[in-house]
Amino acid sequence: MRSILPSPDPFVVRFLRKGLSSPPTSTHSDLSHQQFLIPVISMSIAIYDDQGIRFMYPVNWELDVTEDGAVSTVAVHSPGGPAFFFLTLDRSCPEPKSIAEQALEAMRAEYPTLDAIPMEESIGGHLAFGQDVEFVSLDMPNSCSIRCYRTKNRTVLFFGQWSELEDDTAEQVIQAVRRSLEETDD
């Protein structure tokens, strides 16, 4: 399910500014987290709310959902550049560190000289494991963010990728999407 919010909506602005995984409960705006304020606030925001997850993304980005048994994939890509992200939702609940490593190894098979930095962060209240990756493709620097975590209902793999062909907006959008990710059926 997708809903569209016109922006700038003050509620969405505070949500993106804070980089929160759930909407703020106060009307007071804490500007100490302003580094998460991104250019998306001048765009319309869509909300994906299905498959037990919810996240915000720019309405002009294209979304596709596929299912294969216990695994669902929600893929979203930028209409004007190579930026994209996808979420793989696996109801068989495999171990998240292993899934994140498999994603990194798939990248390493394609780009053997990539640089990867191990990362841990909280996404929607769940400890996520993964890597921040930099690699070169077609003589162009690219980056990706791999994160994976497990809940009682599924293992979630988040993979976001962007290129220097785009301005910083694509990276900021992908980071904001990752921060907005939350489970709705926990």
Image (cartoon, rainbow, N blue to C red):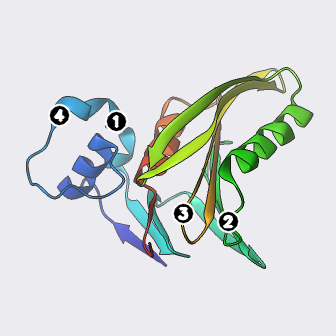
Q: CA distance from mark 2 to mark 4?
A: 37 Å
Determine contact: label 2, label 4, CB under 8 Å.
no
Among the two numbered marks 1 and 3 on one chain, the one whose residue lies closer to the N terminus: 1
Mark 1: which secondary structure?
helix
Residue 176 x %, y %: 43, 45
Determine contact: label 1, label 3, CB under 8 Å.
no
Residue 69 lies left or right of residue 28; in this view the side is right
Q: Amino acid at mark 3?
A: Thr
Among the two numbered marks 2 and 1 on one chain, the one whose residue lies closer to the N terminus: 1
In what quadrant of the picture does the C terminus appear? bottom left
Q: CA distance from mark 1 to mark 3?
A: 26 Å
Q: CA distance from mark 3 to mark 4?
A: 31 Å
In-front residue for pair 129/73: 129
Q: Classify 152 as above or below 99.
A: below
Among the two numbered marks 2 and 4 on one chain, the one whose residue lies closer to the N terminus: 4
The 10 Å Cα crowd at callout 4, few under 14, some 14 to 19, many 20 or more, is few
Residue 37 x %, y %: 31, 37
Residue found at x 61% / y 67%: 154
Q: Which residue is mark 2?
A: 93
**Which mark identifies residue 31?**
4
Q: CA distance from mark 2 to mark 1?
A: 31 Å
Q: Which residue is mark 1?
A: 36
**Is residue 60 visible in the rendered structure shown here?**
yes
Q: CA distance from mark 1 to mark 4?
A: 10 Å
Q: Amino acid at mark 4?
A: Leu
Q: Nearer the observer, disc 3 or disc 4?
A: 3
Residue found at x 53% / y 39%: 170
Among the two numbered marks 3 and 4 on one chain, the one whose residue lies closer to the N terminus: 4
